[in-house]
Image (cartoon, rainbow, N blue to C red):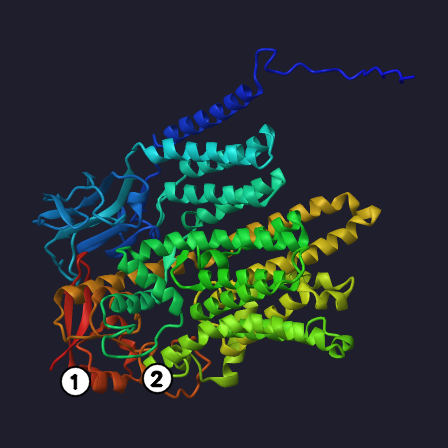
């Protein structure tokens, strides 16, 4: 007999399409509303742009501007004011990345009888001439469009200099205020292309398994944040659209990496923070970056990989980075622009790779904590997304990639067993890191030491097969490294004639005297990376320290300890933001996240702490992030000043290119921008690119500023005999009589009208 069929009580739901309202249509409406709201908000945001005001009646002037030609603040019985010189220069960096048109408004008067005509110039082009009166008047000027390949807005005022009775200054006019107001303009890429990017991100999230709510959770807040940034956008080295495109790209990668909706959103917002950091905080470029640009420039010109044609001195330590710049120049690119662009890309890659590696080691949520610590590290942002221009971020990315691959090769960061191909790849990455920074050799030594000794037992020593497998793995790690690095070393030794780069000799030689400086440098980084929070990095050892040391934690602790000892031994460097520690930021973040995870597990196991623990963790991480992001506020003005100095030195370089004879030379202590833009023989008075000065013996070497201790004024004057020496660095010469005996002071005018003083050799 057949069994009686069971009766199903399941209710069959009618598909929404059968009721006349397809599910996809509702989702499409949600997306359309989101995109229309974005477009409407973007249009509204451009109706009124925040003006940039220079209040000349205040003791401290707005540091947003680059200025010269203003005298000190003065007051009379009626008002406060400033006298100008005969030439006033006001620059708003990257202004044309905000909007293509500006209105300039100035309040001024002649301030003296029989005033001279005053000419207003925009981007070095005369706009109009007026004769000011002795009553204050407000002048409005429509500024010209941006010059080719230049986003900086420049306004200048020029008049014949006059003197007042009893005043020895050469004066121009009296000013009290200046304002630059951007005029609204339709930014079509922002209005049309970015909504398309949001729609594609929505589609990607749905394809990766997110429901309509998950896709909205990702795209809605991200669109709101991007719109808020568009509302409060200000000039930055990269245009808003470019920064937003990086942000959406990072969100797309986060969607591929993460499964949880909240983690995807968190990574997307961290990507936005990193992308826009050069707009949210002061951006800058290091003059030292232009030293590499100079080597690349000569290489492309056929002069060899040299600083000055005919002088083979290895004044750089970033061979791979310099070759990449040379390739860029060969293709007609601008290394300054691409430095900013690649800096954002490297920073985003570091955040996302940190999440990927930590996800294998700690799980997705604690991996997000590690990514949070990396994204909010101003040390990392300062030398990547905010500029810097050096190879630091590229080296950090290669280091982190090598660590991730090495741990995969050990079988420590995933379920798959060890495989020789991962060690081969780790060796290649370590070799590329060594071509980028010499410290890559230290990384290989650390990895080899760890691989040869980790988890080694007496039983292994008694089993020849185990030792053979270990040696084969070590050969797979070291072999490709040697195949790449040894030929490079032989080439550079035959080309430059030195075992080590010239910069090594210029910056070292202090022995133990450099250690206190290195300890202070390390302490500064420890404070900014979290201070006591760094102790959490040892939290993963508490449960089973022997087992932990045999795993990935032991390797990271070994790497962090040995690399930190190296930084202490060399005394750090002089760059703000503790540049030498930037490659370690991601590893410190993973260790801290691991320790915090162990602490939270311990707390959750206790009923009295279980309810409060999540809230305390959120408060801790939020407080730390705010603290970390605000850590450069006290030095942002210094960073802006350093950046402005680079562009002043560019003007000096341009003057050399425009006016110096083919055999004339210049001696400098800022050896980057002047040499790159001047394209004339340049003597580096600090010895980074000069073999003799780099080997000068200094009595208290290691006690001064790193990289600025070695000098030989007599050698510069009597052997190198430069044609010009900027008065900016006259303090370099302790024997002023020798300088005056061979040089006379001249005043030059740069392309921007700035007057600078040089010492010119008499014969």
Residue 142: name its quadrant. top left
Q: Which of 77 and 708 is in front in this view?
A: 708
10 Å crowding of disc 1: few (<14), some (14-19), many (20+): few
Asked which secondary structure carries label 1, the reply is helix
Q: Nearer the viewer, residue 566 or 60?
A: 566
Q: Which residue lies furthest to the front in this view?
A: 1
The image quadrant where one finds the C terminus is: bottom left
| Earlier residue among tags 2 and 1 | 2
- Give the residue number, with chain letter if any, for mark 1: 741
Residue 408: name its quadrant. bottom right
Q: In this view, does 742 lie to the left or right of 229?
A: left
How many numbered tags mark residues here? Answer: 2
The image quadrant where one finds the N terminus is: top right
- Give the residue number, with chain letter if any, for mark 2: 497
Q: Is residue 711 visible?
A: no
Q: Is residue 524 above or below residue 487?
A: above
**Residue drawn at the location 50% of the way across and 83% of the way down:** 513
Image x and y of residue 156, in percent: 19, 50
Q: Residue furthest right?
A: 1
Q: Nearer the viewer, residue 747 or 426?
A: 426
**Residue drawn at the location 37% of the way across and 40% of the way down:** 241
Image x and y of residue 427, in percent: 53, 68
Mark 2 or 1, which is nearer the eye? 2
Q: In this view, does 319 lie to the left or right of 139?
A: right
Q: Which mark is residue 176?
A: none
**Residue drawn at the location 41% of the way across and 78% of the way down:** 489
Q: Is residue 18 above or below residue 302?
A: above
């Amino acid at each position: 007999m057949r069994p009686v069929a069971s009766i199903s009580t399941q209710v069959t739901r009618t598909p929404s399409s059968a009721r006349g309202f397809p599910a996809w249509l509702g989702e499409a409406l949600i997306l359309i509303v989101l995109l229309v709201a974005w477009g409407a908000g973007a249009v509204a945001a451009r109706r009124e742009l925040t003006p940039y005001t220079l209040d000349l009646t205040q003791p401290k002037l707005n540091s947003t501007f680059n200025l010269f030609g203003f005298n000190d603040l003065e007051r009379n019985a009626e008002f406060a004011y400033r006298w100008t010189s005969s030439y006033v220069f006001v620059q708003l960096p990257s202004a044309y990345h905000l909007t293509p048109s500006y209105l300039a408004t100035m309040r001024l008067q002649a301030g003296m009888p029989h005033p001279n005509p005053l000419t207003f110039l925009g981007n070095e082009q005369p706009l109009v001439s007026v004769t000011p009166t002795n009553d204050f008047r407000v002048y409005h000027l429509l500024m010209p469009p941006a010059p080719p390949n230049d986003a900086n807005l420049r306004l200048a005022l020029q008049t014949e200099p006059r003197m007042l009775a009893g005043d020895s200054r050469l004066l121009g006019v009296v000013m009290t205020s200046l304002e630059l107001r951007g005029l609204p303009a339709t930014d079509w890429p922002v209005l049309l292309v970015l909504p398309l990017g949001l729609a594609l991100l929505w589609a990607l999230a749905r394809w990766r398994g997110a429901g309509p709510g998950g896709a909205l959770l990702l795209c809605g807040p991200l669109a709101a944040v991007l719109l808020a940034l568009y509302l409060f956008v200000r000039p930055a080295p990269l245009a808003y659209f470019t920064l937003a495109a990086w942000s959406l790209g990072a969100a797309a990668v986060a969607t591929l990496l993460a499964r949880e909706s909240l983690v995807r959103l968190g990574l997307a917002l961290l990507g936005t923070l990193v992308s826009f950091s050069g707009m949210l905080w002061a951006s800058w470029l290091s003059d030292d970056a232009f030293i590499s640009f100079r080597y690349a420039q000569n290489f492309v010109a056929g002069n060899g990989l040299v600083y000055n044609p005919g002088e083979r001195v290895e004044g750089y330590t970033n061979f791979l980075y310099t070759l990449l710049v040379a390739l860029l120049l060969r293709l007609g690119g601008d290394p300054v622009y691409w430095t900013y662009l690649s800096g954002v890309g490297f920073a985003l890659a570091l955040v996302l790779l940190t999440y990927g590696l930590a996800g294998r080691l700690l799980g997705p949520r604690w991996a997000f904590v590690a990514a949070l610590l990396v994204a909010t590290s101003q040390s990392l942002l300062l030398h990547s997304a905010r500029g810097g221009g050096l190879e630091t971020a590229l080296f950090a990315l290669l280091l982190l990639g090598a660590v991730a691959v090495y741990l995969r090769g050990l079988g420590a960061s995933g379920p798959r067993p060890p495989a020789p191909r991962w060690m081969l790849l780790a060796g290649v990455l370590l070799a590329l890191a060594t071509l980028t920074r010499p410290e890559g050799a230290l990384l290989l030594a650390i990895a080899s030491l760890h691989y040869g000794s980790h988890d080694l037992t007496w039983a292994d020593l008694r089993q020849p097969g185990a030792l053979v497998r270990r040696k084969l793995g070590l050969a797979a790690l070291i072999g490709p490294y040697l195949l790449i690095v040894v030929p490079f070393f032989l080439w550079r030794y035959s080309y430059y004639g030195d075992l080590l780069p010239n910069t090594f000799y210029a910056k070292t030689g202090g022995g133990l005297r450099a250690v206190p400086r290195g300890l202070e440098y390390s302490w500064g980084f420890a404070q900014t990376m979290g201070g006591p929070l760094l102790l959490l990095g040892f939290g993963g050892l508490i449960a089973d320290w022997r087992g932990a040391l045999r795993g990935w934690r032991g390797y990271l602790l070994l790497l962090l300890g040995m690399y930190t000892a190296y930084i202490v031994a060399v005394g750090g460097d002089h760059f703000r933001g503790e540049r030498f520690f930037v490659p370690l930021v991601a590893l410190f973040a993973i260790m801290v996240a691991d320790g915090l995870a162990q602490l939270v597990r311990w707390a959750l196991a206790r009923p009295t702490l279980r309810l409060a623990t999540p809230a305390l963790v959120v408060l801790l991480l939020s407080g730390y992030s705010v603290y970390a992001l605000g850590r450069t506020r006290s030095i942002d003005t210094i960073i802006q000043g350093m950046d402005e100095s680079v562009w002043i030195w560019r003007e000096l370089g341009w003057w050399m290119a425009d006016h110096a004879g083919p055999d004339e030379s210049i001696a400098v202590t800022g050896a980057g921008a002047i040499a790159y833009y001047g394209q004339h023989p340049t003597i580096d008075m600090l010895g980074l690119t000069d073999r003799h000065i780099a080997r000068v013996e200094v009595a208290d070497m290691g006690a001064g500023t790193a990289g600025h201790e070695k000098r030989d004024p007599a050698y510069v004057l009597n052997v190198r005999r430069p044609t010009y020496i900027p008065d900016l660095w006259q303090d370099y010469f302790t024997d002023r009589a020798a300088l005056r005996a061979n040089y006379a002071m001249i005043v030059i005018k740069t392309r921007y009208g700035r007057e600078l003083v040089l010492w010119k050799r008499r014969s």
